[in-house]
Amino acid sequence: MTSGIFDGYLRRLGMPDPGKPSAGALFALQRAHLERVPYENIDIYLGRPPGIDPELSARRFAAGRGGYCFHLNGGFCALLEFLGYDVTRHVGGVYEDAQERSVNGNHMVLTVRVDGEAFFVDAGLGDGPHSPLPLREGAYEQGGFGYCMEPLSGPEAPGWTYITSGGPFPVANFRAAPASMAEFADEHQRLSTDEDSPFIRTLSLLRRDAEGIDLMRGRVLSRIDPSKGPTERVLDTAEEFYDAIATVFGRELDDLTPEDRTALWAKVSAAHEVWLAERAAGAAAD
């Protein structure tokens, strides 16, 4: 890729000249990425999933879009390579079961070696750590959130397990072996087109900052802040909904036509009614 592809990307991060590779610059780049490029699946939810070619992702980020892990970490990997970092992609998997130690391929992880140390770097979890974690066994804390890194056990070893006490997916496992972008193509196809995929069923946006996590699931906007506790509100109008996407998550909306906006709001609202009915049925059963 040429340098021009990354100019707009770096401006999006607010770091037009991040300087030479260093641990400090790497930390600043990840923090900026999490704060300014949201985890989001709007295009997938609308039935027009973007590809995961890193050049395409870099261009999308420069234009104000986001993506999910294959886009976010794929594009970030290309940027770090361009800046001169020793960065490696890995096949990973995220799980609801905290005891799971397999690797199903539904996640991409990055590791970076700089200043004589290796780091777990992940801009694609949405609710992951704000800064890179040392790639060594231990417990870590960032802004009230706790994390743990440990060697991956079981048949998928060698590799690593990332553990967090918060969020719907407390575990991410990844193999130590390097991976190419081609290894994620089939899983991207499944996640972006299969009717059982969570990206097809639920609109999701996440943004991480130093104090907490902003989260949108359908029409429910939440904030997770360890110092203040969680907050939640339902977005009752299309105006509120689109304002939150633009202001809370920093996702530009100029690619959405009026027809797109109408379709997106209608789909999200229909899913919200189903969610309300299921929640009411569950409460009645209890």
Image: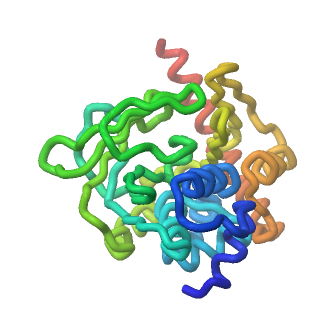
List the single residue furthest toward the right.
239
List the single residue furthest toward the bottom.
2
State which quadrant residue 64 falls in: bottom right
**Across the whole image, how many numbered discs are drawn on residues?**
0
Report whether residue 25 is seen. yes
Residue at figure coordinates x 33%, y 61% from the top left: 90
Is 59 or 68 nearer to us in this picture? 59
Measured from the top left, where is residue 170 in percent x and y? 40, 35
Measured from the top left, where is residue 7 in percent x and y? 70, 76
Is 101 or 82 nearer to us in this picture? 82
List the single residue furthest toward the left.
155
Is 95 or 217 nearer to us in this picture? 95
Measured from the top left, where is residue 183 in percent x and y? 32, 71
Task: Judge whether 211 appears above or below 114 on screen.
Answer: above
Residue at figure coordinates x 67%, y 33% from the top left: 211
Task: Judge whether 82 appears above or below 21 on screen.
Answer: below
List the single residue furthest toward the top.
286
State which quadrant residue 218 falls in: top right
The colour mode here is rainbow
Measured from the top left, where is residue 188 in percent x and y? 42, 66
Residue at figure coordinates x 76%, y 71% from the top left: 255
Residue at figure coordinates x 40%, y 59% from the top left: 113
**The N terminus lies in which quarter of the figure?**
bottom right
Report whether residue 40 is seen. no
